[in-house]
Image (cartoon, rainbow, N blue to C red):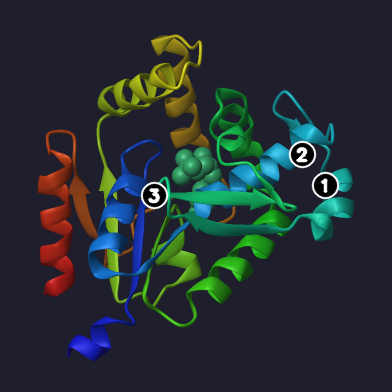
Amino acid sequence: MAEQNNNLVIAIDGHSSCGKSTAAKQLAKKLNYTYIDSGAMYRAVTLFSIQNNLVNGDVVDIDGLKNSIDNIKIHFTFDEENQRYLTWLNNVIVEDEIRTIEVSDKVSPVSKIGFVRSKLVKLQQDLGKTGGIVMDGRDIGTVVFPNADVKIFMTASVDVRAKRRFDELIAKGDKVSFNEVEKNIAKRDYIDQNREIAPLKQADDAIVIDNSFLTREEQLQKILNIVNN
Ligand code: DC
C-alpha cells in the first residue's frame, strides 16, 4: 500500500487565489511528491506575450503568438536554499515577474486560446506521467488527469480570496488597491468558468473544500484525510 501511494496523481482545482498552491505545496512536501503549478505555465506564456508585444489590453495577437509558441520553453526547479519553486521561461527565472497584477490581468485571455492549452496540457501530462505529483490548476481533474487518484476542488468567497491576495501583493511591495484585486479575481472567475475550452468546473468525482474559514493547518489535515482514505 505504501509503495502504491508513492505514485499517486493528486489534482487540486479551484477558483483564483483560494490557496490551492499553498495547500498543494504543503501536501507535496508532506508526501515527498513533486508539486507542479499549472497556473505558472499560463502566466509564463502571458509574460512572454507581454514581453513580445503580443497582447494589448484584453486582446491577444493570436497569429503572432501562434508563430512564437514553439519558442516558449517552460520548466521548474526547486530552490533548496529559499525553499521555493522557481518558474523558468526560456532559461530565465520569472517567478516574481509572473505574479504581478499586469500578468494576472492578462492571463485569462491568453489561457483561453486552444493552441496554448494543448501545448501546456501536454507538458503537464508529461510531467505527471510517473505519478507522485500534486498539480494545481483549473482543469487538472477534468482534462489533464481525468483519472487522477485524488481530485479536490477548492474554493472560498471572493471577499476572502481578494483579502488574501491583496495582503500578499502589498507584502511584496506592489502598489495595488483592494478594489483592483477584488475586481481582477471576480473577472478571472467569470472568464475561467465561461471559456469555451476546458472551463473551470468541478469534476463529478472531486471532493469540495471551502476554506473561507479554515486555517492552513486545518485545510492540510482535511486533504491528508482525503488522500489517506
Ligand atoms: O492558478 P493561477 O491563478 O496562478 O492561474 C493563472 C491563470 O491561469 C488563471 O486565471 C486561469 C489560468 N489557468 C488555466 O486556465 N488552467 C490551469 N490549469 C491553470 C491556470
The residue most toward the front is 81
Vertical placement of residue 88 versus 35, above or below: above
Q: Name the residue under label 2.
A: 49
Camera-side mark, 1 or 2: 2
> Which numbered disc, 3 or 2, marks the residue that appears first in the sequence?
2
Q: Name the residue under label 1.
A: 65
Residue 35 pos. (x, y %): 41, 61
Mark 1 touching mark 2, by CB under 8 A? yes
Q: Residues within 10 Å of mark 1 (few under 14, many from 20)?
A: many
Residue 8 pos. (x, y %): 32, 78
Disc 1 residue type?
Leu
Disc 3 residue type?
Gln
Camera-nearest residue between 193 and 218: 218
Q: Spatial distance from mark 3 to mark 2, Cα to Cα?
A: 29 Å
Which secondary structure, mark 1? helix
The answer to which quarter of the image holds residue 55 is: top right
| Residue located 15% across and 48% down the image | 219
Q: Name the residue under label 3.
A: 83
> Which numbered disc, 1 or 3, marks the residue that appears first in the sequence?
1
Camera-nearest residue between 52 and 160: 52
Q: Can residue 183 be seen in this view?
A: yes
103 lies left or right of 219? right
Mark 1 touching mark 3, by CB under 8 A? no
37 lies left or right of 62? left
Q: Is residue 193 visible?
A: no
Which secondary structure, mark 3? loop
Vertical placement of residue 217 versus 131, above or below: above
| Residue located 66% across and 64% down the image | 118
| Residue located 45% across and 22% down the image | 172
| Residue located 49% across and 80% down the image | 129
